[in-house]
Image (cartoon, coloured by chain):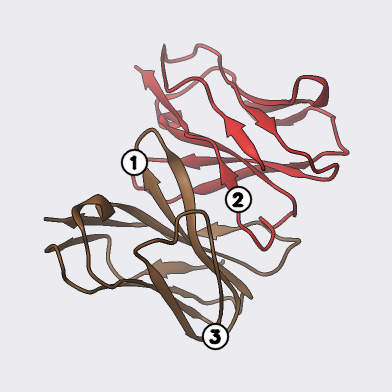
Chain colours: A red, B brown
Amino acid sequence: AQKVTQAQTEISVVEKEDVTLDCVYETRDTTYYLFWYKQPPSGELVFLIRRNSFDEQNEISGRYSWNFQKSTSSFNFTITASQVVDSAVYFCALSDAPGGGADGLTFGKGTHLIIQP
Amino acid sequence: DVKVTQSSRYLVKRTGEKVFLECVQDMDHENMFWYRQDPGLGLRLIYFSYDVKMKEKGDIPEGYSVSREKKERFSLILESASTNQTSMYLCASVAGHNYEQYFGPGTRLTVT
């Protein structure tokens, strides 16, 4: 069975601080895919990134970066120089297929990130 | 752009009512999903469909059924709504196994 743990229920930081959201996963599959989604107050989930289990290179996209470490089964997400618009709930998810597979995605419980001005 | 729409953003129903939540996607996607989102629990898969008239149970199908008569539309049905089905319902679709899921805006259902 697959499992995703986001231990941080809520994080509050002041604007311009860096913040890291933790994600730890469990799976018996040798091939798997990890995702991060952002859910702003409007409610719609926005896809941020997908990584496969064979690619451990860190990813950077503007102020966002992701650190994938198979040795610790972690896929952490860092926002550099946070902004108020980054305030949202962030979900980490796991699947055995790039598109979420036939069984859908296994989500963590989410981390509510609050960026204070 | 991929568009996944849900019939209502907010819905209030009474206990025992039959409730239909509609989801429509405009990109000819094969797979469609219904998730339920609750505080502290994240998103949990209720049902999914990989083709017209095909459906599979997810992790929490009890109390729900689904219908997929046309490729673009996937309906979630609460046969007899109960207060513990008060939740946010999110629909998603994906072109195939090799693509990411696109989510609709969600329907916040309150059962009183």
Badge nearest the viewer, 3 or 1: 3
At horizontal 38% and vertical 33% (from top left) the residue drawn is B40
- The chain carrying label 3 is B
Work out which quarter of the rendered image holds the N terminus of chain A and state it: top right
Circle 1 residue: A41
Mark 2, Cα crowd under 10 Å, few <14 / some 14-19 / many 20+, is: many
Query: In terms of secondary structure, where does tag 1 sit?
Result: loop
Label 2–label 3 contact, CB within 8 A: no
Circle 3 residue: B53
x then y, percent, for residue A26? 69, 33
Q: Are marks 3 and 1 on the same chain?
A: no
> Whole-Å distance between the Cαs marked 2 and 3?
21 Å
x then y, percent, for residue B2? 56, 67
Q: How many marks?
A: 3
> At label 3, which amino acid type do we have?
Lys
Query: In terms of secondary structure, where does tag 3 sit?
Result: loop
Query: In terms of secondary structure, where does tag 2 sit?
Result: loop
Work out whether residue B109 or residue B63 is closer to the camera in this orientation and state it. B63
Label 1–label 2 contact, CB within 8 A: no
At horizontal 45% and vertical 40% (from top left) the residue drawn is B42
Circle 2 residue: A105
Work out whether residue A62 or residue B12 is closer to the camera in this orientation and state it. B12
Badge nearest the viewer, 1 or 2: 2
Closer to the chain start, of discs 1 and 2, is 1
> Whole-Å distance between the Cαs marked 1 and 2?
21 Å
Up-down relation of residue B91 to residue B36 (above or below): below
x then y, percent, for residue B11? 20, 62
> At label 1, which amino acid type do we have?
Pro
Work out whether residue B106 or residue A72 is closer to the camera in this orientation and state it. A72
- The chain carrying label 2 is A
